Image (cartoon, helix red, strand yellow):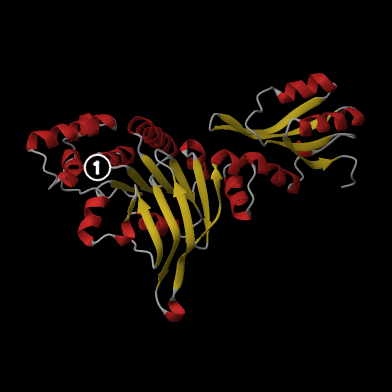
Amino acid sequence: MIELTHISKDFGKDQQQVHALRDVSLSIDKAEIFGIIGFSGAGKSTLLRCINLLERPARGTVTVDGKELTALNARELRRTRKKIGMIFQHFNLMPSRTVAGNVAYPLRGSGLGKKETEDRVTDLLELVGIKDKANAYPSQLSGGQKQRVAIARALANEPNVLLCDEATSALDPQTTKSILRLLKHLNEKLGITIVMITHEMAVVREICHRVAVMEHGRVVEQGEVFHVFSKPEQEITKNFIQTTSNLRKIEELLSENSPVVQLQPGELIVRLSYLQRNVSEPLISTVSQKFGLSLNIIFADISIVEDAPIGGTVAIISGERERIEEAMKYLIEKKVGLEVIKDARISE
């Protein structure tokens, strides 16, 4: 659906020049939810705006649904853009128009009659769950309701692609979840391709199929969300994942010499991580029963990504050293990531 080939974009000149994008190539499939993440200044928003040519790349080509946008004239580009919806962090609603008026606005010049426009607006508001707010004004709405209006407006011209620029960053966690559920529903119901820009790994984990990680204007890592989460290759990706997991809190407890991490002779602290999709058996209880060990879980952080568990646990293992060694070998054979965090045999 979307093909970006060797995209580069610069701002400024000479000594003030900033290389916002550097030779970025991406392929995004039809009906896919594709996430692009990166810290501030990574170039992700610039890349998103290159997809509909709100920012024209200095080099490279942009192809959407078989049309090379970078080769179109102004009139053709305007027509093609109608099939690319966009929603923003701060909603960008017109305060002087009602909810229905905001949603109807993109339909001007579409050739639809008044009754057809009204029906279309009603259907869209029902689709996003705010049909009862048609006559309200943006100032009367919550943040989540405003974003639902913005989504309905973006869908007015029945686009094939929906671009989301930090669409949940201004929302509280509960509202964010409801908007993500809505986007996932729209993806499944309409078959629309969604590209999401975010700095929140939790958003990617929630609904994206694949993800690209950006740093300094480049895509440094990309792939299926499960693979990127379970086996991150780049330091930037590891940092992102750590921000969404409490499994790293063990390092804080160790640095504080917390009583929680004080070990008895022979004990050790391990971090267990799921590395593949087919981990389904109850490993903690299996290891405890099979090897006669005691496992005291300090932290657990397990999410479902693409219908598979991802994350892991931090636990204190107690028991005979020989049995502990056998248990660790067993876990490794089961494709579980195992990291010894602290070992009571090692002098502190």
Residue closest to the eye, 83 or 180:
83
**Element marked by disc 1:** helix
Q: Where is residue 208? Give x, y as percent.
A: 47, 39
Q: Is residue 312 above or below residue 51?
A: above
Q: Residue furthest front?
A: 66
Q: Where is residue 12? Give x, y as percent.
A: 39, 74
Q: What's under tag 1, amino acid-wise?
A: Arg
Residue on which the image places disc 1: 153
- Classify the position of the N terminus by image quarter: top left
102 with respect to 44 (left or right): left
Q: Is residue 78 above or below residue 155?
A: below
Quarter of the image for residue 312 reads top right
Quarter of the image for residue 292 reads top right
Residue closest to the eye, 56 or 66:
66
Q: Residue furthest top?
A: 289
Q: Is residue 62 visible to us here? A: yes
The residue that appears at 33% across and 60% down in the rendered structure is 70
Residue closest to the eye, 220 or 66:
66
303 with respect to 163 (left or right): right
Q: Where is residue 135? Give x, y as percent.
A: 16, 35
* Number of numbered markers: 1
Q: Residue furthest left?
A: 114
153 with respect to 309 (left or right): left
The residue that appears at 74% across and 30% down in the rendered structure is 334
Q: Is residue 166 visible to us here? A: no
